[in-house]
Amino acid sequence: MDRDPDVEGFLALLAARRAPKTVEAYRRDLAALRAFLGKPVAQATLEELETYNAQMRADGLSPATIARRTAAVRSFYRHQQLLGARDDNPAAGVQLPRRPRPLPKTLSPGEAERLIAAAGGTRPRNLRDQALVELLYGAGLRVSEAIGLDKAGVDLSGRLVRVVGKGDKERVVPIGRPAAEALRRYLAKGRPFLDTRHRPELFLNARGGPLTRAGAFLILRKLARTAGLDPLRVHPHLLRHSFATHLLEGGADLRSVQEMLGHADLSTTELYTHVTDRRRRELYFQAHPHARRRNTEDHVASRSTRHSPDGNRLGRGVADDEGGSG
């Protein structure tokens, strides 16, 4: 099929602002639409684009692929509008497929304890690492909130931390006794040896400057290796996910968890209920005898212990013979 001059002009302008791979992806997406239309892309109507969208779904393309192709087409028509070649953007009316939100990954309670235990030691940096991991897991802070804390934001007597979250919204989060004790040790015996520049930030690096996001990531990866966990899997937000999931599994109400996490929308917090539902299902299928699929050997063994040689069922005691005690 001949090159589409309108598309080529759009891609040339795009190349000045985007990476070559992005430009090639747009080229492929727009070429796919032109092949479907059998005419220049600039001439498409809303009805034709909706038909194309339905065809992509029928072809089994993933929601992510359909959304990416639609985004490329929308960008092209915005370009056409800016040039004055079209008065409308027909792709703006095309409904995008709903993309499933992936469930948050978490540590198990045992893995979280192993990670905390890996931060043992009495050197200033050890005490800092203990306080950091206890705070990330014990208060569910975002890494930006943790490294942005000042000393004045920590109330050890009340076991509270005052953090500034997204949108500069301030919230107060309770912390448990282990996190408070780790912070107390760090402030008394660790931070004074790191504070060579008299900084207000709570967490400092080895040179006395404020701890960065990259520094926090490296600390957790180091602790993960020590704990025998996959270091590529462990990151600050994983501890935040674990905090929320373990709270809900322990019986905390959704609104309280929302407030502690600083979520503006309750639906964001509700994602964690799906994680706990999934975990309950996994535990059920692992633990309940009628949920497990027996193999042939188990089934034969079960039959041999429950029946006598003459075919009569052997009871497991008086309770079985009398119908059980419930």
Image (spheres, rainbow, N blue to C red):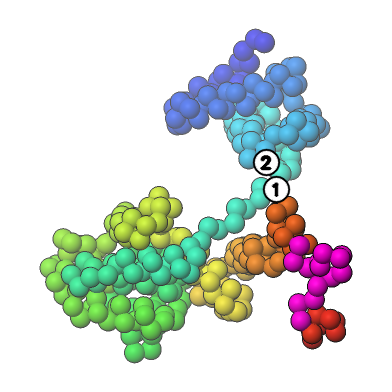
Q: Extreme top residue here?
A: 2
Q: Amino acid at mark 1?
A: Arg
Q: CA distance from mark 2 to mark 1?
A: 7 Å
Residue 317 visible, this orientation: yes
Q: In the rendered view, would you say 279 is above or below 218?
A: below
Secondary structure of the residue carrying numbered label 1: loop
Q: Which mark is residue 236?
A: none
Crowding near the residue tagged with mark 1, few <14, some 14–19, many ≥20 C-alpha atoms within 10 Å: few
Residue occupying the point 61% across, 15% down: 5
Point out the image quarter for the C terminus. bottom right
Q: Which badge, 2 or 1, is on the more N-terminal residue?
A: 2
Query: Which is more toward the observer, 308 or 190?
Result: 308
x then y, percent, for residue 305: 74, 66
Where does the image place residue 132, in percent across and percent down from the top left? 33, 69
* Most foreground residue, 102 or 249: 249
Of helix, strand and loop, which one carries label 2?
A: helix
Name the residue tied to disc 2: 63
Count residues near mark 2 (Cα–Cα under 10 Å), then give few for <14, some for 14-19, many for 20+: some
Question: Image height check: is 141 above or below 153?
Answer: above
Q: Which residues are magenta?
A: 304-317
- Proximity of marks 2 and 1: CB atoms separated by less than 8 Å: yes
Residue under circle 1?
98
Q: Is residue 311 magenta?
A: yes
